[in-house]
Amino acid sequence: MTSAAQVVPLHERRSSLPQDVARCILAGFDKHYRLFRAAAIKAKELYELADWAEMRRLARGRIQMYDLRVEEAVRALLDRFPEAEVDEALWPAIKLAYIGLLHEHRQPECAETFYNSVACAVLHRRHYHNEFIFWRPAVATEHLEGDTPSYACCYPLVGGLRQTLLDIANSFALKNPWENPRRDLRNVVHALRQHFPRPARAHPDLQVQVLRSLFFRNKGAYVVGRIINGHHEVPFAVPILQNGRGELYADTLLMGEDQLLVLFSFARAYFFVDMEAPAAFISFLRWLMPKKPRAELYMAVGLAKQGKTLFYRDLHYHLKHSTDRFAAAPGIKGMVMLVFTLPSFPYVFKLIRDRFAPPKEIDRETVMEKYLMVKLHDRVGRMADTLEYSRVALPLSRFEPELLEELKAECASLIEFDGEEIVIGHVYIERRMEPLNLYVDDCKRAGDEESLRSALREYGQAIKELAGAGIFPGDMLLKNFGVTRHDRVVFYDYDEIQPITDVHFLRIPAARSYEEELSAEPYWRVGEHDVFPEQFDHFLVSEPRARELFYEYHRDLLDPAFWRAKQDIVRSGEQEGRCGR
């Protein structure tokens, strides 16, 4: 029997319900962010142990962490407050109560996004119709800091440049000994002088600003900061690697915005960074890379859902301030994905077609599994990251009529029309790149053999680096690769990728007769996972001069032994590459 002291009057429960629900949601977020920071701390331990296989497992697990915490929070909320699911009138008060809880919070922007995820799951409402979520941020994050400032200022005029650099290196308290610290200091100072050549004068404000947490990814730990000397500001990053004995050494000095943009590329794996106040870290990174969208920086440090939230806001903000129309993306149309773009917005939108033309024999679920495989895998700077959204509403008036007709014909199951909007049920969004086949054609037309040679060398290198990371791209035609603004070649067609260890790389057997040799069809047996690299010669690069340039660097791609050697490395548990620059 329930005692009188335990009975809560209905009107009192009703009045306290919004606050209780808000606290329940925030508790779910706080657990998520606690685990997120714990993963960054664990990454530091794994780096010190050189346990790269466990580091990769940790990276995969962290990507899926957010969705698991949202599911937990939704279950906890509905168990305790089932009326929140059926009574939408409660939610304006819940949102208001939640805002009050964020007043002194260190991650308010991420907590708002978590609230949106939980609210939309509880209410089973379409995101674009739900007035109860944070469409715009309610809590400002400008000048937000944690108990410990996000970055430190060091003054070379006080202690000397070498001592300042040594103090910075030691401030991160890595347990490993240094291989040769004097050599590394000498090399860093020499590299710095190339950017500040004599007779460079030290101004009174000369300082080195360094983020207090290392950025861990793959086999590297990165020091990230900037040097300020008068009106001259230079961003930098230093990858710290390990030799075979576990000793540390500074691999290189990356300086300037362009080099950092490549380091923080959308084709890279996400960093592990311990951040009490992520907004403070993002603000600092924006000083270093003002061209980099805030959304992509949040994704780069592992806060992918926050990045998606900001991207969606950026998209709708751009739509309000532009007038051009969505149109089919340039390049050869794919058999699996329908791709369109807004010319003034540097992204492409990819929808899975309802039907695939022969010879494609896969289904929608398989394509989605391939994209998830890429999301969970280390992209080694060679596979484009994708943002996956459901029920995206876009203004119907902003679509070219030809594109609308193609969407109706090819993706009818994914679209619906709601008044003046088209609602896309499922879409992948990627950074727009110039298709490699179009780039190669432009180089040939312009007679620019140097750019052509560079692009083809990059193309083969991209295939090799994917193989070294355990990925067989499958369809390796030029049209499935893109060229970034930094002239890197990146793969972006995932419907035929597979783990390299699942493939059998074989030599074409010798013909047993003259008739077999002249046969238009393969005279040898071909299993489901059999690949004959010698056949790549017929389709990788078709134009004679371009093929000649390509095979100056990459003829080994036609040899099954090359691919088997990559398989051996992957099966051994190793991953090629030093630190994923």
Image: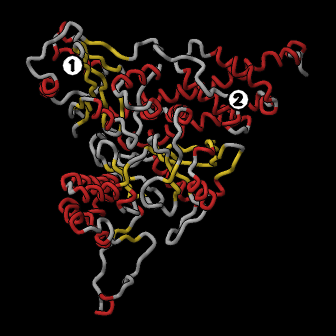
Q: Marks 2 and 1, how far apart in space?
A: 51 Å
| The N terminus - image quarter | top right
Circles 2 and 1: CB atoms closer than 8 Å: no
Q: Which of the colour schemes (rainbow, by chain, secondary structure, one colour) is used?
A: secondary structure
The x and y percentages for residue 23 are 68, 20
Category of crowding for the residue at label 1, using alpha-carbon neighbours closer than 10 angstroms: few (below 14), some (14–19), many (at least 20): many
Q: Nearer the viewer, residue 138 or 22?
A: 138
Q: Give the labeled residue for mark 2.
A: 131
Q: Secondary structure at mark 2?
A: loop
Category of crowding for the residue at label 2, using alpha-carbon neighbours closer than 10 angstroms: few (below 14), some (14–19), many (at least 20): few
Where residue 394 sits, quadrant-wise, is top right
Classify residue 233 as left or right of residue 400.
left
Classify residue 320 as left or right of residue 15.
left
Q: Give the labeled residue for mark 1.
A: 165
Of labels 2 and 1, the one closer to you: 2
Residue at the image position 53 percent from the left and 54 percent from the top = 369
Where residue 300 sits, quadrant-wise, is top left
Residue at the image position 49 percent from the left and 44 percent from the top = 342
Indicate whether 570 appears above or below 110: below
Q: Secondary structure at mark 1?
A: helix
The x and y percentages for residue 501 are 39, 60
| The C terminus - image quarter | top left
* Tag 2: amino acid: Glu
Classify residue 479 as left or right of residue 184.
right
Marker disc for residue 460? none
Can residue 569 be seen here?
no
* Tag 1: amino acid: Leu
Residue at the image position 60 percent from the left and 29 percent from the top = 114
Q: Earlier in the sequence, mark 2 or mark 1?
A: 2
Q: Nearer the viewer, residue 173 or 390?
A: 390
Farthest residue toward the left?
Answer: 199
